[in-house]
Amino acid sequence: MHNHINSPSLPENVMSINWNRVFLVVLYDKEIQDSQSISGILQRDSGFCDDDLLILWNNGPTSLTDIFLNKDNIILINAINNTCLPQIYNLFTHLRFGHIIILDHDTTVTNEFVKSTSKVIDGMIGLPTITCDGHVEYPKEFKKPSRIKRTRRGPLRISVSSGFYFQKSVFDVY
């Protein structure tokens, strides 16, 4: 099966499968093999499985060559028009999945992180912990750094979007 597509849609066979997790990595001006996020997801013992889907969304400015032609659960979408991020994210709400993980191309993805993405429960959103020089910068709760990793409705929490994850059921809660 050839999983390289040039339009912002997904092949029917991908739409009909019940995926455990969908990892969406948005690339911009970055080769696939140079993406820190992709390398982290696909590293040995990361927890990425055959029932997980990895979508590589190339947002431009030039088309990329698919280096995963023989992988049924890795798809490259060359949508080189620099689509705005909310539009990209909304395209995947129709997929059948348990969890979705949204990443930029330069996010450090550890084995622990990949494995933790399955632990978020109904109605919760997993937030990435962003550190700088050993200090937590995000997420923030009431404008102060916080070590909280999963959240439901409640106090105002702010985080960066790369690395957040949730179960599909979050659409029913929010």
Image: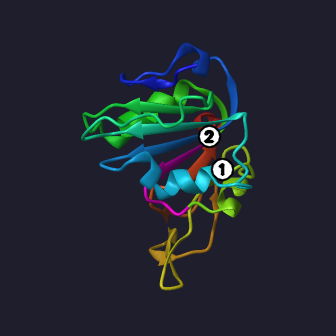
- Is residue 153 visible to the viewer in this orientation of the structure? no
Nearer-N-terminus badge (1/2) = 1
Residue that numbered label 2 is attached to: 170
Specify few, some or many for label 2: CA neighbours under 10 Å numbering under 14, 14-19, or 20 or more: some
**Front in this rendered view, residue 97 or 109:** 109
Q: Which residue shows up at 62% across the image and 34% down it?
A: 172
Magenta span = 100-108
Q: Amino acid at mark 2?
A: Val
Q: Quadrant of the C terminus?
A: top right
Compared to 85, does 19 lie above or below?
A: above
Residue 96 covered by magenta stretch = no
Q: SS of the residue at dot 1?
A: loop
Residue 145 placement (x, y as % from top left): 51, 77
Residue that numbered label 1 is attached to: 124
Residue 169 placement (x, y as % from top left): 66, 36
Compared to 55, does 154 lie above or below?
A: below
Drawn side of residue 143 relative to residue 154, left or right: left
Q: Amino acid at mark 1?
A: Met
Q: Are marks 1 and 2 in contact (CB under 8 Å)?
A: yes
Compared to 37, does 79 lie above or below?
A: above
Drawn side of residue 94 relative to residue 61, left or right: right
Q: Which residue shows up at 73% across the image and 50% down it?
A: 47
Q: Which residue shows up at 52% across the image and 31% down it?
A: 75
Drawn side of residue 156 relative to residue 22, left or right: left
